Amino acid sequence: MHPTTCRTKRTTVLLAGVLLALLGGCSSPTATTQAHGTNAAALPAEPERAAPAGLPGMPPVLDPKDIYAADRPNRLSAAVRGFPSRVYVPNTNSNTVSVIDPATYKVVETIQVGVQPQHVVPSWDMKTLWVNNNRGHTLTPIDPATGIAGKPVNVHDPYNLYFTPNGKYAVVMASLDRELVFRDPHTMRPLKTTPVSCYGVNHADFSADGRYFIVSCEFSGELLKVDTEKMEVVAQQKLPFDGAMPQDVKLSPDGKTFYIADMMAHGMWVLNGETFATPALLPTGKGAHGLYISRDSKVMYISNRGEGTVSVFDFAQNRLTKKWSLPGGGSPDMGGVSANGKVLWLSGRYNAEVYAIDTATGRLLARIPVGAGPHGLAVYPQPGRYSLGHTGIFR
């Protein structure tokens, strides 16, 4: 008997007391009784297991079913509401940041920064943009209210930058140094250095409760699981693909699944972060690289850098539903979604250009010339309460 339909196909005459108990159970959607014989009796409902406590100091999750609930269209926090809308593009080979006005699709300023800028990263409090000058061993702060760059801060090998969900630490992905360096999120003073045995730590994302994060190791084809509070690697695995090169990492809206783009496996790995079991590969396209969630949390955009396409993954259907091709080709890499959710912005890594793509149709809205080697561009400001780093992971 199904407890919510109150049906019974049994022809056996039940004892009156048992029958009443069963009928009483049918009236409640939480009843767990299943009759297997005339001696069946109602069992007490098993209490729901409480969700594990979040990382101390982390803002509470707004909606357990959607960790991106704070990222709805144009829901800008007071901290960023007055900032001009801009797209900041780090040009790795030009040592500059191109600043695009998204209203006109024009470059309105070019900022000189350090050697080999890789990503433009919003700080946890969303008040500063940090340019990761990887080979210049500095971070250049940009004030998003004015667009003015400040004095560079000395930080060794800052390939990428993240922030713990409680805002306590900045986490520098020191790719060539083979280290995760936990730093003061404001001064960038080093607080703890965690050596890693893999090669090329580059991208990451945090669990829904913030207690751990998954890191991709590009050059050795590995994944790490890191305890946020202890600042230690607690698990490590080699991806089951010869020559794997994992890239961007993103958590599903329901907080149950991590997706890891892989530019050599030409798809994304689907990982259970809790068990950290061997992930499955979902093919998306040649050179899968960046992962970006839509403003309604319904789909994820995957940039396939090696073939000039963007795949669209539907979370509810658990499958790819669309693939958009850039007219004339291109090399879509890293980026983000506009504040209103209508435009996907991606750098063209090998084409010295930036793409603006309509998220409703996949139509290319603009192809904007920038400096050489554009990489981890940041669309700013964006909705959300705080930033986890990279080109903008907001919750």
Image (cartoon, rainbow, N blue to C red):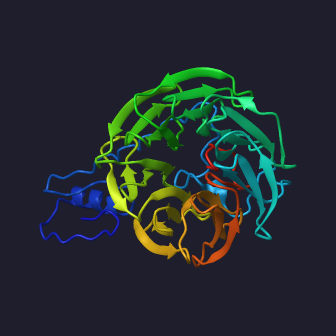
**Does the image show residue 80?**
no
Which residue occupies the foreground of this view, 37 or 83?
83
In the figure, residue 268 lies in which quadrant?
A: bottom left
360 displayed left or right of 1: right
Which residue occupies the foreground of this view, 48 or 6?
48
Q: Where is residue 113? Give x, y as percent.
A: 75, 42
At 62% from the left and 51% from the top, the residue drawn is: 376
Measured along the vertical axis of the image, is residue 23 above or below residue 226? Answer: below
Which residue occupies the foreground of this view, 140 or 337?
140
Measured along the vertical axis of the image, is residue 183 above or below residue 124? Answer: above
At 57% from the left and 27% from the top, the residue drawn is: 181
At 55% from the left and 68% from the top, the residue drawn is: 330
**Does the image show residue 303?**
yes
Q: Where is residue 148? Give x, y as percent.
A: 85, 45
Tally of numbered tags? 0
Measured along the vertical axis of the image, is residue 290 above or below residue 51? Answer: below
In the figure, residue 345 lies in which quadrant?
A: bottom right
Q: Where is residue 379? Give x, y as percent.
A: 70, 57
Q: Where is residue 52? Give x, y as percent.
A: 48, 36
Quadrant, the N terminus: bottom left
In the figure, residue 70 lies in which quadrant?
A: bottom right
